[in-house]
Amino acid sequence: AEERDARKAKVMEKKEQCQKEILLAAIKERNIKLVLEPSNEEEELAHGLAEISLDGFHSDNATGAKVHLDADGNLNWPVLFLYPEHEQTDFIAAFHENSRFIDHLMLMFAELPPWDLERKYLPSNLELYFEDEERAEMYELNPEHTLLQVLQHERSRLRSATLKKKKKRKS
């Protein structure tokens, strides 16, 4: 029984490793830039929803969301939206790589969020940013772009398969 269990575990481990390699190949095939060495900041954020480990491509949260290929071979990513002004977040467990940000914003803000008492958070008023860590700058992205377009942007880098996005309202 122990030998059988050990063989099963080894087969499962090999299958999981194969799936990881297929996933990593799909990411590289799309010219998405990965930075594999973890930073101190990432280690501090390791318990956050946006953090995804390359070792297993899973987030360390209760949702169990992870980067995955769907039946059509398209990548789906967990995406965290941050609203720093109100210390709020939204989490999309499977953001399809060909989905546009504006489409998600239209759904997420179809109704006024209870924390937006001033009625500022309308899809047409929102600005989306990702962090360019090399230049220590925030880079504005076009809400009409797809997730894949943003992931392929020359200034976009995924650390441990994580793209940090922040969203704030226009001034």
Image (cartoon, rainbow, N blue to C red):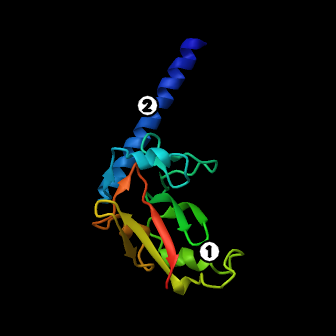
The answer to which of 51 and 31 lies nearer the viewer is 51
Quarter-of-image position of residue 142: bottom left
In what element is the residue under mark 2? helix
Position of 165 relative to 26 (above/below): below
Where is residue 85 drawn, in percent x and y? 57, 72
Position of 27 relative to 146 (above/below): above
Residue drawn at point x = 58 percent, y = 80 percent: 106
Quarter holding the N terminus is top right
Of circles 1 and 2, the one toward us is 1
The answer to which of 142 and 134 lies nearer the viewer is 134
Numbered circle sitting on residue 98: none
Which residue carries the number 2 mark?
14
Residue drawn at point x = 46 percent, y = 36 percent: 16
Residue drawn at point x = 42 percent, y = 59 percent: 163
Q: Going from the N terminus, do you reach mark 1 or mark 2 first? A: 2
Where is residue 24 drawn, in percent x and y? 36, 48
What's under tag 1, amino acid-wise? Met
Residue drawn at point x = 65 percent, y = 81 percent: 110
What's under tag 2, amino acid-wise? Lys
Where is residue 146 drawn, in percent x and y? 42, 72
Quarter-of-image position of residue 120: bottom right
Instruction: Count every numbered label the image shows and give the total.
Output: 2
Left or right relative to 81: residue 62: right
The Cα–Cα distance between marks 1 and 2, rounded to whole angstroms, is: 39 Å
Where is residue 101 drawn, in percent x and y? 49, 74
Which residue carries the number 1 mark?
108
Quarter-of-image position of residue 147: bottom left
Residues packed near mark 1 inside 10 Å, few (<14), some (14 to 19) or many (20 plus): some
In what element is the residue under mark 1? helix
Residues packed near mark 2 inside 10 Å, few (<14), some (14 to 19) or many (20 plus): few
Position of 38 relative to 165 (above/below): above
Circles 1 and 2 in contact, beta carbons < 8 Å: no
